[in-house]
Amino acid sequence: MKCRRCGGRAVLELRRHNTAFCADDFLAFFRNQVHETIRRWGMLTRDEPVLVAVSGGKDSLALWDVLLEAGYATTGLYIDLGIFDYSRESKARCQAFAAGRGARLLVVSVADEVGAGIPQVKAVTRRPTCSACGLSKRYIMNRAALDHGFAVVATGHNLDDEAATLFGSTLRWDESSLARQTPVLAATHPKLVRRVKPLFRLSERETAAYAFLRGIDYIVEECPFAKGATSIAHKEVLNRLEDVSPGAKASFLLNYLERARPRFQAGDPVELRECARCGQTTTGEVCAFCKLADQVRRSGAAAVAAAVEAEADDAALRGLASDVGAASEIHAS
């Protein structure tokens, strides 16, 4: 298989584009896709600082790498979720990436903001893990941007992420979620910053290839709480569709954004006000994040400590089960 551009040996075939690239030409293709997305959607300007939300995974670090190379004034933001070894290892990847490039990295701990890490929040509030995590990340991203003078936050959501979200919202006909699905979330209140997704046209496979070819050290493991998540099931369905019809994900998402999304934006705008506690935006008197923090505080230190111990034991058991399974596979082979 030959590179479509230079005729050299291709290292990656992109079936949805009916093409293949060598390493250098693929890197150029990837960067061009990001820059064209930024230009076409008016995501960033050269004279504004950008806060890049990084998780230690391939997508967010690949995005930060492209923006740094292009000369954007970026700062990374890592949100420490307190998920045991997973958070420690992902934070270390972000710190090493920033140090190797002389870039600034902000670290904010959920435990410092809400009184406990995500596993303990789940245990003491009985709230679904992904719900508490998503709420905390959105709140901290926005507040950190405001506190440090950033007008825009860039996240590493890729094509697979966005197509799976759209698929789930469509299955439920969740009109409010469909109206909000866009690669650029405008700042509709003085206490909100703009959020952009420069990788939304690039697949997970493409970002993984970029990170590998660039030698980016990223955390490969999924969040331990992601197992059984509906979003993963949606991705698997879309992957099967993509196998038999290359380009299906991009067609689904891009055609929605162009043709269907305007129909879901015709509803009455939501009235936002400032939270009486923290001053961030909310539709009520007190924002959801402050209510979550109240729940954790009311549970008391003893309950949080017990939750920490229980979750740590569960994590150890999951690790042991994984080790036993791996050993079994080795012996079987």
Image (spheres, rainbow, N blue to C red):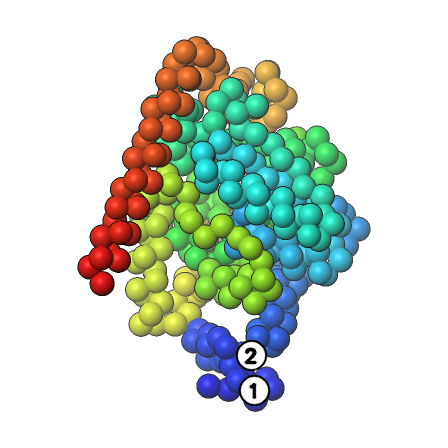
Q: Which of marks 1 and 2 is nearer the N terminus?
A: 1
Q: Does residue 64 lie above or below 290 as drawn?
A: below
Residue 142 seen: no
Which residue shows up at 68% across the image and 52% down it?
100
Instruction: Determine which residue is flagged by label 2.
Output: 22
| Tag 1 near tag 2, CB within 8 Å | yes
Residue 241 image position (x, y, % from top left): 32, 65
Q: What is the residue that sits farthest to the front in this orientation? A: 331
Q: What element carries label 2?
A: loop
Name the amino acid type tagged 2: Cys
Residue 9 seen: yes
Q: What element carries label 1?
A: loop
Q: What is the residue that sits farthest to the bottom in this orientation? A: 7
Name the amino acid type tagged 1: Gly
Categorize mark 2 by other alpha carbons within 10 Å: few (<14), some (14-19), many (20+). many
Q: Nearer the viewer, residue 103 or 275?
A: 103
- Compared across the picture, whether 13 is left or right of 5 comes to left
Residue 313 image position (x, y, % from top left): 33, 28
Instruction: Determine which residue is flagged by label 1.
Output: 8
Residue 90 image position (x, y, % from top left): 52, 43
Which residue shows up at 76% across the image and 58% down it?
71
